[in-house]
Image: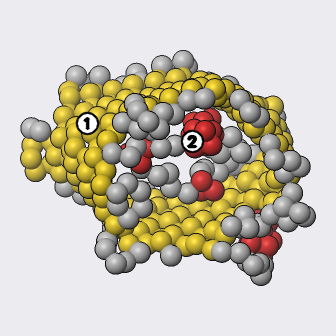
Amino acid sequence: MKTIKNTLRILSTVMALASAPAYAESTLFVGNMTSGDSKGSLTLDTLANAQSDNGANVVVEAINSNPNTDSRVNNFSLGVRSPKVVNNNLRLNAAIDYKDTQAATGSRSTTASHTTFVEALPGNTLTLRAGFFGTPDSKYGEFIGAKNVSDNTTLDLDVWHNGTNFNAKGFVAYTDGRFYGSAGGDPRVQNISAVNGWMNKDNLGYVLRATINPKNESQIFKLTLTDSFTRERKHLDFRSHMENGTEMRGVATGYILDSWAPFDAWDSNRYASVVKGANDMNMTNGSAVLYRHINPGLGGTMFGIGAKFSHDKASATTNFRPKAEFYSGIPKTPLDTWVDVSINSTNPRDVAGIVYLGVSL
C-alpha cells in the first residue's frame, strides 16, 4: 500500500505539470480491442491517449481478462509525460501498473509497480535520463540511461541497481542511406535482439525483427516485406527500443508510455506481407498475411488474408487456421475500425477474433 501511495503522489505531480496551461495543439485518441473465441475466452483492452505538441502526454489502459468468470484478471496502467520545460531541455515521466487477480477458488491478490524518471535534453542528439522504480515483488532501485543519435549511429542504454544487483540493457544501431541494423539485449533475462531494415521508398523494402533467448531455447521473429517502405530511421529506432525495452520498459512497469503500435502493414503504400514466428521448448507458432492498402494510413482501407498455425510439441498436434483482416476509417466521422477473424481448419465452429473501434480527435 505504501508503494501505491508513493507512486500516486509522483504521478499527481507529473499530471499537474502535464495539465498546466500551455499554448499548444492537443490530440486525443480512445480505442477498444475486444478479443475472444467460441470457447468462451474474452479480453477487453481499452486505451486513451492524450498528447500535446509541447511534449505533454497522458496514456491510460485497462485490460480485463475473462471479466464474466470467477477466474479473472484486471490490469490498469497509467503513463504520464510532462511538457518540456526549461527551454525544452527537461521533462518528467512516470508510469504505474496495477494488477488485480481473482482465482476460481475466491482468493484475490493485487500488485502495483512504478517507474519514474526525468529526461534531460541538452542538445539535438543527446537524451539523458535518471529515475527510480518499484517492482511488484517490492524491490526498489535506481537507474540512469542515455540515448545518443548521430548521423549514422544510435546508442540507447539503461543501467540500474535493484537493491541487490547491477543490470544493464540497450542497443546500438547503424544506418547508411537505406540500410538500418541494430543489435542489443538484456543480460538479466538473457535476451539477444536485432532489427534490420531496408528503407527503400521507391521499390522493395523490408524490416526484420528477431529475439533469441539461449537459456529458454526460444526464438521470435517478424519479417515485413513492402513494395515501398514508408518508414524512416526514427521509426526503426523506436522498434529497436521496443525489442530491447530501453527507458526501463519491462523491468518494473510495461509499455504504457509507448501506447499502441501502428499496424505493420502501414510500412507500405500498397502491398505488404507480414510473416511471424515463435519457437520454444513447448510450442512452435507462426503466421503469414498479405495486405493490400487503399489510401493507406489512418482513415484509409486495408485488407489482409493469410493463415496461422501452432504446433504443440508434447502432444504432437498442429492447429492450422486461415485468417482474414479488414481495416477502414468510417466516412465522415473521426472513427476507424478493424476486424481480425481466424477459423480452425478442422473445426469450423472454432472461431477466434479481434474487433477494434477507435476515435481520434
Marks 1 and 2: CB-CB under 8 Å? Answer: no
Crowdedness near tag 2: few (<14), some (14–19) or many (≥20) residues, C-alpha within 10 Å: some
| Mark 2 residue element | loop
Crowdedness near tag 1: few (<14), some (14–19) or many (≥20) residues, C-alpha within 10 Å: many
Q: Which numbered marker is on residue 73? A: none
* Vertical order, 15 against 35 (above or below): below
| Mark 1 residue element | strand
- On the question of residue 8 being in view, the answer is no
Q: Judge by depth and name the residue closer to the eye, 84 or 340.
A: 84
- Badge nearest the viewer, 1 or 2: 2
Residue 15 x %, y %: 74, 72
Count of number-bearing discs: 2
Say whether residue 35 is left or right of residue 93.
left
Residue 286 x %, y %: 31, 31
Say whether residue 81 is left or right of residue 193.
right
Residue 36 x %, y %: 28, 56
CA–CA distance in space, label 1 to label 2: 29 Å
Farthest bottom residue? 21
- On the question of residue 347 being in view, the answer is yes
Q: Which numbered marker is on residue 308? A: 1
The N terminus: image quadrant: bottom right
Q: Judge by depth and name the residue closer to the eye, 18 or 112.
A: 18
Give the residue at mark 2.
232
Rendered image quadrant of residue 187? top right
Mark 1 residue type: Lys
Rendered image quadrant of residue 245? top right
Question: Residue shown at 25%/36% (left/top)?
Answer: 308
Residue 220 x %, y %: 45, 28
Farthest front residue? 202
